[in-house]
Amino acid sequence: MSALWVIAMAAPGLALASSLTGVFATARRPVPLRFLSLPLFSLSGLAALLCGAMALANGGSATLQLPLGLPWLPWQLRLDALSGFFLVLLGALTLAVGIYGVGYVRDFERGRDQLPPLGAFSGLFLLGMELVLMADGAYLFMVAWELMTLSSYFLVAFQHDHAANRRAAFLYLLMGHVSGLCILLAFGVLASFSGSFAFAAMRAAHPDFLWASVAFALAFTGFGIKAGLVPVHAWLPEAHPAAPSHISALMSGAMLKVAVYGFLRVVFDLIGPLHWQWGVVVLTVGSLSALLGVLLALMQTDLKRLLAYSSVENLGIVFIGLGLSLIFLGTGHRLLGALALVAALYHALNHALFKGLLFMGAGAILHSAHERDLDRMGGLLRRMPWTGTFFLIGSLAISGLPPLNGFVSEWLTFQAALQTWQLHSGLLRTLIPVAAAVLALSAALAAAAFVKAYGVAFLGRARTRHVRRARQVPVSMRVGQGLLALGCVAAGVFPSPFIAWIARVPQSLLGSGLPQAGAQGWLWLTPVSPTTASYSAPGVLFALLVLAGLTAWLVHRGAVRRVRRSDAWDCGLTPPTPRMQYTATGFAQPLRRVFGAWLRVDEQVEIAGSGPRYRLQIADRSLALFYAPVVRVLDRLTRLVTRIQAGNLRVYLAWTLGTLLLLLWVVTL
Amino acid sequence: MSVQLLHSLVLVLAALALFAAFAVLGQARLLAAIHAFAWQGALVAAVTLTVAVAESAPELYFSAVLTFSLKALLIPWMLHRLVRRLGLSRHLDRPQHPMLATVFAVGMVMFAYWLVLPLVQSSLAFTRNIVAISLAVVLIGLLTLVVRRQAVAQVLGFMAMENGLFLAAVSATHGMPLVVELGVAFDVLIAAVLFGVFFFQLRESIDSLDVDRLDRLNEAREDQP
Amino acid sequence: MGGDAVNAADTVLAVAQALLWPLAAPLLVGWVRKAKAMLQNRRGASVLQPARNLGKLFAKETRVAHTASPLFRVTPYIVFTATWLAAAAVPLLSTHLYTAALADVIVVAGLLGLARFFLALAGMDVGTAFGGMGASREMMVSGMAEPALLMAVFTLAMSAHSTNLSSVVDHQLTGGTLLPSMLFALGSLILVAVAETGRIPIDNPTTHLELTMIHEAMVLEYSGRHLALLEWAAQIRLLLYGTLIANVFFPWGIATTAHPAAWGIALAALAGKLLVLGAALAVGETVLAKKRLFQAPAFLSLAFLFALIGLISHVILEQGL
């Protein structure tokens, strides 16, 4: 076995070891979880990171036959640039999550929560994700996929003494199964053309347009559910907040990306020739997800829910990039397709970094202030300066502001969208600018959402007593956050080397990389050509620092240097209290009025005996527009089935007998 | 002995097994039905032995021994003991329409013959016959499950189906791979044990072994009391 | 671009141009105020008055609320620097500008967004009602203005096949004809500029009424040199939008060579264009009244639609022209 495979096998091996050691942790003896299971978890991430980087560096692909599986359905592993990239993403996040978890799981040691399932299922969850990324056949892929879904179900249901968490977990399980079913059917369609469940055979077979489209639709539905795209996102804002925060970070940061990987693997790699019509569908769904996700994120007051909805938005942006890529590839523009694909992948990486960081920040607040409701926070920056700084970096990055990483990927997506003039179809020429407009709108609204989240939670004054008593979190949690913050800054300031690595994915997948991107040296990012667009992130950062230093130096040369502390302006009336501050609900009110039509806002003022009470409920329109009809149809169908479902065992057996006889008869025809 | 003769012996034995299936279907007394099932098991073992001699396949000897000890001795003994411990030795469980069931069963035998006609036309008449008989045994087993209300009788039907499948496997394809056979035997044994547990649970919760009383699932009936 | 094209003269010119921004910005504000005063039959303060105000603020003592965090104190520097850098990437006098390669028009919008992000955070930092109110309103306005801005410049970027502002201006100079899409983009950009620089009818830069103020509510707690930096940044932003409109849509006179005479002409031309624009702004502010806050979205969605129509009419109708 080559060194690559030794490291690659170490990753799932360590994940399994982490799972097994986690079983032995109890509330009284948490050492196995904290000092054995979680370090192994981190090491597994490190191994994934290394083997992913090696696979990216290799460029080609390497396969390995496992001595497992069924005789005619062997388990085969394969590492190529695509899986390498996602392994790097998963590994980097896992490394940080494992370190962070050491401090975070202390929360559960005092409570009534059972520690063994936490460690055991975390390890299995990681194992599932790693195997999905390495699988080279539909059989192993589906086994790993279900392992990932089921173990994360147990993690969502971890704090099952809250009814809401149980409901969230059930919804998650349900949607997870629908998703798994769709993916299985997609593989079924592909396998019927290739005659085998091995990916290599599927790659060689080329179904006709109709069947390829069927496979595409099934795969897009299946992976779209898992990626939380509108309108099948309903599970995401319920499940992600319910899990322990370090798991939320992993679910939002990595699991959604595994779905993106699956989509890329099936659509870009296995189905065969791409068609631009698929791109139109993906682009539309992506745009809708980006817009609706950010609007709903803006309306949330629960920090973890806000982050979860923002994941819907960011996955929408990723799929906008993928849709653009499909359109360009389907119309024969290989270079532009590669550009859009790189943009999507870069955003996926960035989202893993900053969303992981933000969920960790939310976890840190939960850990030290035991609060998730924004409207009860405030003033945390001074109480938790490290977490506050890291959360600020994450907020800036997710809002797509230079010189951090979120900006780079959005910039690349815009650059791809701006190449629309090279297309000839009127439909596409209209659609892509609209998608670009949606992207711009959702980026601006994301900034509003994170000004709200950061401003209300970390700035101002503490709104409740327990938040006032919040303290610094343990070192390991700060290190975990710090690693990801560092990643955000690095990916933002030095995009050219990152893109050079990511461009190996389209190089191996489509045979076309981005030769121009780093052609002007590492300082410059020029995706199409130097005259078309250029961005120098190190230059911008350097200029910012120099100008800021210059300004500060000049200003401080002035006569009065002293800064005097005084009370805030109170209009000459009573001193302001923390309750007078704008709350998260109040902050979002103007935008709620503007975009009210997109949401279902139920706002009431009740005049009761004890004075007026204000009630506000914001629901997702997709519930009424998409889920309710589906539920109605299903309900009607199940009513029909109850006629057959007499409940009598022998009647069921009679149905079986009848069916058997009928089938036997059919066979002889 | 000539192969021809052995083949007809197999057919005769298989036909007897089919007859045993009829007995399991129609016999109202549970103990008698268990005996019929034990005979069926013994007949299947005999068929296996005959095929082993005819084809000189040594692994089928082992298979025959396994079948005999499991299906003719162990499982009937376990069921027997269960019935006695549940106090059902004198229990009568008549199908609602015994004649109808029998007629239907005969119909299914004919159906089975008709089915295999095109299936193995090119092959030997022997194979065709034995497949038809096996299929009939399977179908009658399933029919037993449908018409008998007693849980123990249903288990017998289930086991009879398994016998039918085994018969087909042994005589038409000269036995399954040994691993598969061992696995199936083990499964059957486990199923018998589980059924035992299930009977006790069943009686504890509904005070009867009549599966018709297991219809609480029916949502529609709850809606309209 | 990198390396060969950069020589000493270019560097000097780029630095000079970058330094011109903060120097020229107070003058434009002074001119707008002067013009407004004259329209109202007043004599008005000198054009230099905003610059003098800045000097006065820099000399004053700086006060910070007890409840303010360190973020409150670094924000003025970040806002000022980001706005200045964004401005430095816009061709002011010459298209031969290598800072424009450093940051294209999307980066300019991003840097302005960075400044706004910190300003809104600083507004919420002290923990008074005004700051939160200003931040909330500012994010509503910018949430709609920023996409409109991007769409408007994308129309130009698509016709020039470049998002580099230098290349866009070059393209406008050489091959740009006035097309319907350009008109839409111009209209959109003007609406956005009015909203983003906090002018009537969206915001009133001179009011301190809590019901109406947006920008002023955020900077209410600032004083002394901090306030001076924020005011200065706001002035630079006004100049930035003015220059963007003037140089991109009416690029006449801008220097394309690194010749001192060309620079002189460019300076004169720019001054002329900005005088006209400033006067137009003053007229607009005099004849219009401030809108209610919740009519601002209608105003901004008009800008957004203009920009989108411009972009679509460009890609559909004008392709190949």
Image (spheres, rainbow, N blue to C red):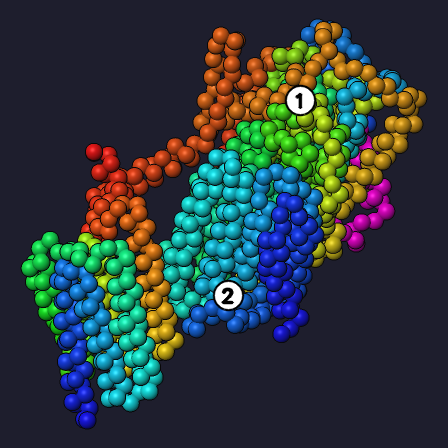
Q: Residues within 10 Å of mark 2 (few under 14, many from 20)?
A: many
The picture places residue B93, in percent across and down from the top left corner, at 15, 55
> Which quadrant would residue A378 be assigned to in this image?
top right
- Residue A463: give its label: 1
Name the mark nearer the viewer: 2 or 1.
Answer: 1
- Residue C306: give its label: none
The picture places residue B60, in percent across and down from the top left corner, at 31, 83
| N-terminal-most mark, 2 or 1 | 2
Q: Which residue is mark 2?
A: A136
Q: Chain of mark 1?
A: A
Q: Is residue B143 left or right of A468 when viewed as pictured? A: left
> Which quadrant would residue A406 be assigned to in this image?
top right
- Residue type at mark 1? Arg
**Main SS, magenta residues:** helix
Residue C14 on the magenta span: yes
> Which quadrant would residue C251 be assigned to in this image?
top right
Q: Residues within 10 Å of mark 1 (few under 14, many from 20)?
A: many
Q: In this rendering, do the residues under marks 2 and 1 share a single chain? A: yes
**Residue at (52, 72) in percent of width and height:** A67
- Residue type at mark 2? Asp
**Residue at (66, 36) in percent of width and height:** A367
Residue B16 on the magenta span: no
Which residues fall within the magenta stretch? C1-22
Q: Considering the image in quadrants, where does the N terminus of chain A appear? A: bottom right
Q: Considering the image in quadrants, where does the C terminus of chain A appear? A: bottom left
